[in-house]
Amino acid sequence: MQNAVSRNMVESLGVPAFRVGYTITTDALDALYKKIKSKGVTMTALLAKATALALAKHPVINSSCRDGNSFTYNSSINIAVAVAIDGGLITLVLQDADKVDVYSLSRKWKELVDKARAKQLQPHEYTTGTFTLSNLGMFGVDRFDAILPPGTGAIMAVGTSQPTVVATKDGRIGMKNQMQVNVTADHRVIYGSDLALFLQTLSQIIEDPKDLTF
């Protein structure tokens, strides 16, 4: 596993990557998670669902360039989530995340984690991702950059949600829970304006998450 990780990281060095960060208010998402957590919903599934819905509106972010000449515009939205397993790193894939409800995504996520720990994953369960999430927020990390996995166009690093002092619309001081996300993208197929529009849409979905449970 470590050899595979090493090969992928070295391959990534040849990609002209760039990074864009965005701050997202998570009060509504946190409230939704608290409400449906007892039904087995995971925060990973909520973030994957939100990301998939945003990708559906900005399909170029779901594309990739393998060798500088061939470009792939994926029709399926498969969210790969980076997970540390036995000292190594693997990306578990939630396939068609834009079409699957968040309850089924949560069950599938738990199934994939159990299979990964038991070393029973099938290749399609870790090799078919079209966009990658890397979440270190559960460790209290507020921001970080992720290395782009070979064969994908973008990866999003998700930091922890934490109380932040903000200025309200009426000019007063208030508190909101906010998280930092940083996307690393392949500039051969994705441009800065594309990524900015994607992040705006993602922010809108997370800050008004009513569509995540349908």
Image (tube, rainbow, N blue to C red):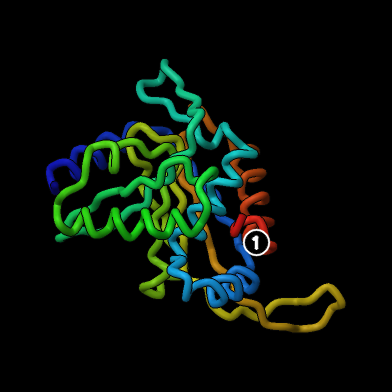
Image quadrant occupied by the C terminus: bottom right
In the displayed structure image, the side of residue 73 where residue 116 appears, left or right: left
In the picture shown, does residue 173 fall above or below 110? below
Viewer-proximal residue among 116 and 176: 116
Residue name at image x 38 percent, y 39 percent: 129
Residue name at image x 42 percent, y 33 percent: 16
Would you call the spot at circle 1 few (<14 residues within 10 Å), some (14-19), or many (20 or more)? Answer: some
Viewer-proximal residue among 190 and 30: 30
Q: To which quarter of the image does residue 134 belong?
A: bottom left
Residue identified by numbered label 1? 209
Q: Position of residue 74 (x, y in %)?
A: 48, 28
Residue name at image x 52 percent, y 58 percent: 181
In the displayed structure image, the side of residue 210 where residue 178 appears, left or right: left
Q: To which quarter of the image does residue 153 belong?
A: top left
Element type where label 1 sits in the image: helix
Q: Amino acid at mark 1?
A: Pro
